[in-house]
C-alpha cells in the first residue's frame, strides 16, 4: 500500500455500508418506542396528548425523517470517502453522536414520556446538529449541505416539543 492509499478514504462499498448507519441507528434506538399500533401503550399515550396547531400530519414525520436520514447517509458516505484527517474524523464523530441523539430523543419523548427533558434534548440536538454541519463543511461542502435539513427539522421539533410540553402540563 502506498502512502497515498493510506491517506485515501474508505472504499465505496465499505463507506456505503457504514453510512447506512444513518438509517439503522435511529431505527434500532427508537423502534420499541414508536407510536404505532405495534406499541399500543405508546400509541394511545401519544394520541391522548393535546397537540399544538403547528403539529404536522402524522404521515409527514416519518417522511421527513426518511429524507433527513437519506441526507445524513449521503453525507456520511462522502465523509467516509474523503481522505483521512482530524477534521474528517471530528465530523464523523459528530455525525455518529447526532445519530445516537436522534434515537435517544425518541426514547425520551415516546418511551420515557418526559416532555421537559425531551425539549431540552431536542435543543441539545439542534446545537449538536449545527456543530456537526459546521465540521462537515470544513471537509466536504456537499456533505454539509445534505445535513442542513437535520438542523432545520430539529429546530422545528424543538419548538414543537416545547409546545406539546406547554399544552400538557
Image (spheres, helix red, strand yellow):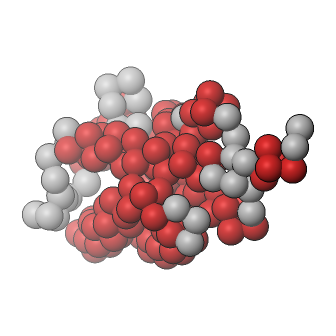
Percent position (x, y) of residue 29? Answer: 56, 41
- From this view, report whether residue 72 is shown above or below residue 141: above
Tally the numbered discs. 0
Quarter of the image for the C terminus: give it.
bottom left
- From this view, report whether residue 123 is shown above or below residue 58: below
Horizontal arrangement in the rendering, residue 120 relative to residue 59 (left or right): right
- From this view, report whether residue 123 is shown above or below residue 65: below
Quarter of the image for the N terminus: give it.
top right
Residues 40 and 4: in front is: 4
The answer to whether residue 96 of the structure is visible from this angle is no
Q: For the point 49% across and 43% down, which residue is it?
A: 73
Percent position (x, y) of residue 46? Answer: 30, 46
Q: Residue furthest left?
A: 53
Q: For the point 18% across and 58% down, which residue is it?
A: 55
Residues 50 and 52: in front is: 52
Horizontal arrangement in the rendering, residue 26 relative to residue 41 (left or right): right
Q: For the point 63% across and 52% down, which residue is it?
A: 82
The answer to whether residue 37 of the structure is visible from this angle is yes
Percent position (x, y) of residue 111? Answer: 49, 46
Amino acid at each position: 500500500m502506498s502512502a497515498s492509499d493510506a491517506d485515501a478514504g474508505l472504499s465505496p462499498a465499505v463507506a456505503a455500508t457504514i453510512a447506512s448507519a444513518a438509517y439503522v441507528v435511529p431505527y434500532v434506538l427508537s423502534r420499541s418506542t414508536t407510536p404505532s399500533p405495534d406499541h399500543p401503550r405508546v400509541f394511545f399515550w401519544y394520541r391522548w396528548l393535546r397537540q399544538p396547531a403547528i403539529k404536522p400530519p402524522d404521515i409527514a414525520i416519518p417522511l421527513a425523517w426518511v429524507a433527513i436520514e437519506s441526507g445524513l447517509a449521503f453525507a456520511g458516505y462522502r465523509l467516509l470517502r474523503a481522505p483521512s484527517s482530524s477534521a474528517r474524523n471530528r465530523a464523523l464523530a459528530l455525525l455518529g453522536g447526532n445519530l445516537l441523539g436522534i434515537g435517544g430523543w425518541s426514547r425520551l419523548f415516546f418511551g420515557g414520556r418526559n416532555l421537559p427533558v425531551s425539549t431540552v434534548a431536542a435543543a441539545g440536538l439542534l446545537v449538536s446538529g449545527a456543530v456537526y454541519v459546521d465540521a462537515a463543511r470544513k471537509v466536504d461542502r456537499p456533505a454539509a449541505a445534505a445535513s442542513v435539513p437535520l438542523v432545520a427539522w430539529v429546530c422545528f421539533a424543538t419548538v414543537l416539543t416545547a409546545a406539546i410540553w406547554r399544552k400538557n402540563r
